[in-house]
Amino acid sequence: MPSEKLDTYFKQVDVMTDSFINRLASAVAIPSVSADPALRPKVFAMGDFLVKELKALGAHVEARELGKQPDHPELDLPPVILARYGEDKSKRTILVYGHYDVQPALKEDGWNTEPFELSVDEETGKMFGRGSTDDKGPVLGWINAIEAHQKAGVDFPVNLLMCFEGMEEYGSEGLDDVIREEASKFFKDAEAVCISDNYWLGTEKPCLTYGLRGCSYYSITVSGPAADLHSGVFGGTVTEPMTDLVKLLGTLVDNKGNILIDGIKDLVAPVTEEELALYPNISFSMDDIYTSLGSKTVIHDDPIKVLQARWRFPSLSIHGVEGAFYNPGAKTVIPAKVTGKFSIRTVPNMELEDVDRLVFAHIDREIAKLNSNNTFKRELMHAGKWWVASPKHWNFEAASKAVQKVFGCVPDFTREGGSIPVTLTFEQATGKNVLLLPMGSSTDGAHSINEKLDKRNYIEGTKLLGAYLHYVAEEKQV
Ligand SMILES: C[C@H](N)C(=O)N[C@@H](Cc1c[nH]cn1)C(=O)O
Ligand SMILES: [Zn+2]
Ligand SMILES: [Zn+2]
């Protein structure tokens, strides 16, 4: 058992707490928003930051350039950063993945603090900042683990391969090809894969995740007049694009979460008795969902139904309207062109092509019903497939032991409502088991305002990642 080495490593992590928080603060200060063309240089800057940190620790680092962004040919895609720490043939080799881009964030969206300044509340231990939990904290967790081993003089237990991308929040543009290409090259020695980019179910108990929903993201564009118009002068004389769009968006889903697109439900695999038996053992209560939501505005009032709605069934969310008036005040404008955006979270056995076919058939039918003289365009913006794996593997076994060592409890085995499409690509390209080992908790507010990572999750999470690697080194391959 790696107990003594682990205790030395844990003590070192505690000693280095402030320095690890400073590292996170430096990373959060780089607004690496992949969706904002104006901030693309910052995504590159964040990649450079990681390269510098990794090289300073003696890792071998290579960058894979991805060329231009297909839907914005004027933009360069940020590189995929590949790194290797350790080349000892007698050790296991583990491949880890994370992303260094973040979701957009503006103070005026409702943040209590500047989103790109890490703001640490010493009383609660909450560390607010965009990317703190998704996914800069976990990515830095791997780097912290390397550094703490060095400083503690504890031999690093495995060879660590790292793959960090800068376009995850924009559909992981270009990454699949790199993974397939490198499976027999940079990643060839990998014996298992670990991804830390999702969240605990609650705030106290860690989990290991073996399933993800997929995400198919669509847009509908409605255009009419050549330019935005005065609603007093032109209201009642022109077919308004926004009126058509609101009608179309209103046909997709009801406020009880039922998807109204014909045929979607038929694509979902029936829930088995075996699966049903797993839910009651999972620590999850209505209070957990209330705390995560910050409200009681739930659709289901039973925790098992909540979990199933999140993991096991598809959902459709309407995200926003480009071109619409959204500022405070009362602007009397008729927008000339509006683009509505929505996505469907997909589950087994929904095939991407079937979902697209049903979505487009539905939109076309609804457009025809409008009898409108506006112009309509509907598009799939990006898609990633769902993933479910078996947690009966030494990779999960090692992570479970690490959770028990660091947190003193047996983790829940969970699925996740969010999507990390490259998980499936890693599994298929390397042929190895993939484990999702989250660092953040259910209240972190990833993608939302006031995103945070608790100090405890960051520091104990850094211990967890290191401990996982020690237990992995000890697991027998079956
Ligand atoms: C779970 C992960 N941290 C995450 O946030 N994934 C994103 C992936 C995505 C899909 N479309 C755009 N980004 C998510 O689930 O929304
Ligand atoms: Zn993420
Ligand atoms: Zn995200």
Image (cartoon, grey):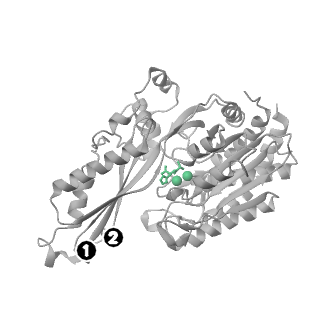
- Does the closest atom of ligand 1 sit within 8 Å of the Cβ of label 1? no
Rendered-image quadrant of the N terminus: top right
Q: Which mark is residue 327?
A: 2
Q: What is the CA distance from the residue labelled 2 to the residue labelled 1?
A: 8 Å
- Considering the numbered disc 1 on the image, is that residue within a helix, a strand or a loop? loop
Observer able to see residue 223? yes
Quarter of the image for residue 289 reads top left
The three-letter code of the residue at mark 1 reads: Lys
Residue corresponding to mark 1: 331
- Using the image, determine if residue 244 lies above or below residue 161: below
Q: Which mark is residue 119?
A: none
Q: Residue at x 30, y 40 (%)?
A: 258
Depth check, front residue: 236 or 354? 354
- Considering the numbered disc 2 on the image, is that residue within a helix, a strand or a loop? loop
- Using the image, determine if residue 180 lies above or below residue 431: below
Quarter of the image for residue 241 reads bottom left
Depth check, front residue: 100 or 298? 100
